[in-house]
Amino acid sequence: MEFPGNCELKEFNRLYKRIDELYHEIALHMGISDSAFIVLYFICEMGEGCLQRDICNASFLSKQTIHSTIRKLQKDGILTLKQGRGRDMHILLTEQGRQFVEKEIFLVVQAETAALEDMQSQGSELVRLTEMYLKKLRENTVQLRLPEN
């Protein structure tokens, strides 16, 4: 059986995997799991007080993965939860968590920002082309009956 994709698809997949591996290495260097990195990253992006479902929606990780990661970070003294309306629990950083985020996660965000800025207008073009790829991929997979995101 031969791979039905072309050379560009193979290269795109390879690059996507290399980016994923880089974030894995970053999380390992920080001494946290990939899912913990993602949770802390999205808390930074969305702001403290966000909800578990906000992180699930933004990260595309399962509710169970996010829930167990939050519990582990809570146990480690990085996060705390505050009761909201109904069953909503707001996720907050502890002082230890704030220090960790400022020392570790912010450096990654700064590196990402610098990488896009170093690319000058190509950074915007990368975002535009990635959005176009996603749109075209969704159009070409309509027969799979995937949910809209």
Image: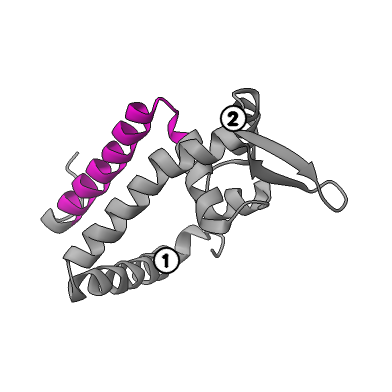
Q: Residue 134, position in %: x, y?
A: 37, 66
| Residue that carries the numbered disc 2 in the rendered image | 73
Marks 2 and 1 in Cβ contact (< 8 Å) = no
- Outermost residue, left side: 7
- Side of 130 relative to 121 (left or right): right
Residue 8, by quadrant, is: bottom left
Observer-nearest residue: 95 or 24? 95
26 or 110, nearer to the observer: 110
User: At 68% across and 52% down in the image, what residue appears?
Assistant: 49
Q: Position of residue 45 (x, y in %)?
A: 50, 56
Residue, disc 1 = 138
Q: Residue at x 20, y 54 (%)?
A: 12
Q: Is residue 28 above or below residue 131?
A: above
* x 65%, y 29%: residue: 74
Q: Closer to the N terminus: mark 2 or mark 1?
A: 2
Q: Is residue 103 above or below residue 118?
A: above
Q: Which residues are magenta?
A: 9-35
Relative vertical location of residue 23 with respect to residue 86 in this rendering, above or below: above
Q: Tell me, yes or no, whether the highlighted magenta stretch contains residue 11.
A: yes
Q: Residue at x 59, y 48 (%)?
A: 56
- The alpha-carbon separation of the residues under discs 2 and 1 comes to 35 Å
* Kind of residue sitting beneath label 1: Arg
**Crowding near the residue tagged with mark 2, few <14, some 14–19, many ≥20 C-alpha atoms within 10 Å:** some
Using the rendered view, name the quadrant where residue 21 is placed: top left
Q: Is residue 80 left or right of 27 when viewed as pictured?
A: right
Residue 111 shown in magenta: no
